[in-house]
Image (spheres, rainbow, N blue to C red):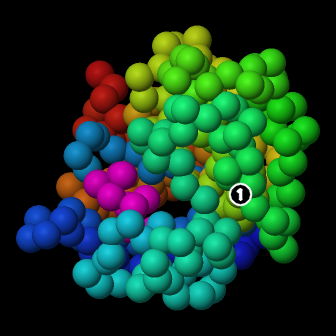
């Protein structure tokens, strides 16, 4: 695996108005890694992703993407560099078909990024291939989530940020989702994943961070995170 730090945050603090949410947060994702960010609801996981993609402007600190500082850039400028983002609420176009949603997300080939085509996306998501003309409003939550990820891939990102992709899905669909995420890992896709399903997330991760009250409290390979009973009790909900 390459040592290139594709995405890196150093000493980042963020707030919503006067309410500070992130405190001196540092993390990174290297090329080809799946990195997971774990923690309780309200710990700052989603705010971390929104800060990285430019939806929340940091109060302080540095954010680098491919070595370039982007903490003061607009979200559309960051997206053009190849930083993809699938938000917690999916935001597919419910009045558009599967094909139309995918076409909306399609971008030109990007140097240094996996080249996702419609054919390749449908191989990854065979269920979507069978409902190309179905409107988003007529899809299940799981199907909408798959479409949201597929649309994100059509932008040919260098790294994909996923915010709680398993939220609200049935257990069988969650397992299917994580099989897809494992396939992305095997394709060499760089992914930064936030998800409450800690055991499944750690199973596909190269490294993990644990966040508490807006600060990173530990980081390591999945075996180290799993093996720390105190962390599992405090942050991952284990008993």
Please provide the residue range marked out in magenta. Answer: 44-52
Could one spot residue 24 in this view of the protein?
no
Q: Which residue is mark 1?
A: 155
Q: Residue at x 75, y 61 (%)?
A: 107
Q: Position of residue 191 (x, y in %)?
A: 63, 53
- Does residue 204 appear left or right of residue 87 in this picture? right
Q: Determine the residue positioned at 75% across, 36% down.
A: 99
Instruction: State yes or no: residue 83 in magenta.
Output: no
- Relative to 149, residue 66 above or below: below
Picture residue at 33% right of the left edge, 26% below the top:
238
The answer to whether residue 219 shows anywhere in this view is: yes
Q: Residues within 10 Å of mark 1 (few under 14, many from 20)?
A: many
Residue under the point 67% across and 31% down: 97
Label 1 secondary element? loop
Asked whether 226 or 176 is in front, the reply is: 176
- Where is residue 73? Give x, y as percent: 46, 83
Give residue 128's quadrant in the image: top right
Provide residue 14's location: percent of width, then percent of height. 26, 71
- Residue farthest along the front direction in this orientation: 95
Quadrant holding the N terminus:
bottom right
Question: In the image shown, does 58 or 188 lie closer to the viewer?
Answer: 58
The secondary structure that most of the magenta stretch takes on is helix
Residue 50 sits inside the magenta stretch: yes
Task: Look at the image and tell me in which quarter the C terminus lies.
Answer: top left
Position of 197 relative to 40 (above/below):
above
Residue that protrudes farthest toward the left in the picture: 18
């Amino acid at each position: 695996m390459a040592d290139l730090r594709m995405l890196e945050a150093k000493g980042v603090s963020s707030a919503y108005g006067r309410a500070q949410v992130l405190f001196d947060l540092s993390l990174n994702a290297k090329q080809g890694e799946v990195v997971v960010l774990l923690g309780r609801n309200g710990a700052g996981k989603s705010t971390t992703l929104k800060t990285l993609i430019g939806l929340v402007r940091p109060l302080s600190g540095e954010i680098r993407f491919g070595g370039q500082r982007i903490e003061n850039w607009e979200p559309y400028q960051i997206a053009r560099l190849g930083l993809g983002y699938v938000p917690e609420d999916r935001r597919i176009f419910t009045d558009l078909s599967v094909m139309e949603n995918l076409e909306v997300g399609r971008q030109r080939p990007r140097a240094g990024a996996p080249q996702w085509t419609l054919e390749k996306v449908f191989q990854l998501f065979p269920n979507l291939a069978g409902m190309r003309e179905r409107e988003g409003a007529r899809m299940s939550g799981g199907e909408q989530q798959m479409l949201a990820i597929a649309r994100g891939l059509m932008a040919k990102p260098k790294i994909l940020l996923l915010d709680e992709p398993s939220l609200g899905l049935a257990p069988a669909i969650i397992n299917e989702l994580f099989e897809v995420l494992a396939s992305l890992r095997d394709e060499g896709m760089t992914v930064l994943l936030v998800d409450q399903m800690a055991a499944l997330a750690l199973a596909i991760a190269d490294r993990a961070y644990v966040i508490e009250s807006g600060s990173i409290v530990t980081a390591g390979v999945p075996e180290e995170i799993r093996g720390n009973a105190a962390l599992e009790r405090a942050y991952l909900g284990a008993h």
